[in-house]
Amino acid sequence: MTNQLINRYRARPWRMTASDYLAGAAATGEDDRISLNGKPYPTPWDPQLAEAMQRTNQALYEVAVADTLLNDLMKPPSGRQDTL
């Protein structure tokens, strides 16, 4: 899906690196772990991501990294100062 978004809309992956994935996977509780299934796809924006996913074989859902994503959204964009 990410490859399609990049190709069609020139999207830039956000929090989709191998280190982001591994941090989320490590934070996922044992009872919430689900194995990956289906065909693996390359991750040209970070080739180590595909390798990490194959190595851990663990699905990662947004809820596992929600705090990190929300913290990112709370910060003003770099180069701009927001005032409230």
Image (cartoon, helix red, strand yellow):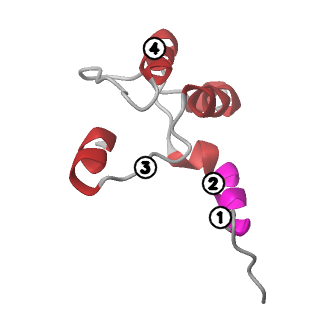
Distance of mark 2 from mark 1, alpha carbons? 6 Å
Who's the residue at 45% across and 14% down the image? 51
Q: Are marks 2 and 1 in contact (CB under 8 Å)?
A: yes
User: In the shown orientation, is residue 17 left or right of residue 40?
Assistant: right
- Look at mark 2 in the image and give the residue it sits on: 69
In the rendered structure, does residue 20 fall within the stretch colored magenta?
Answer: no
Q: Are marks 4 and 1 in contact (CB under 8 Å)?
A: no
Q: Which mark is residue 73?
A: 1
Q: Amino acid at mark 3?
A: Arg
Who's the residue at 61% across and 28% down the image? 25
User: In the shown orientation, is residue 83 left or right of residue 68?
Assistant: right
Distance of mark 1 from mark 3, alpha carbons? 16 Å
Pick whichever of labels 4 and 1 is earlier in the sequence. Answer: 4
Of residues 30 and 23, the one drawn nearer to the viewer in this rendering: 23
- Look at mark 4 in the image and give the residue it sits on: 51
Please tell me whether mark 3 sits on a helix, a strand or a loop. Answer: loop
Establish if 48 lies above or below 7.
Answer: above
Distance of mark 4 from mark 1, alpha carbons? 28 Å
- Choose top left, top right, bottom left or bottom right for residue 57: top left
Q: Are marks 1 and 3 in contact (CB under 8 Å)?
A: no
Who's the residue at 49% across and 18% down the image? 48
Q: Residue furthest front?
A: 79
Q: Which mark is residue 7?
A: none
Q: Amino acid at mark 4?
A: Glu
User: In the shown orientation, is residue 30 left or right of residue 46?
Assistant: right
Q: Which mark is residue 12?
A: 3
Distance of mark 4 from mark 2, alpha carbons? 23 Å
Distance of mark 3 from mark 4, alpha carbons? 20 Å
Q: Amino acid at mark 2?
A: Leu
Q: Quadrant of the C terminus?
A: bottom right
In the rendered structure, does residue 68 fall within the stretch colored magenta?
Answer: yes
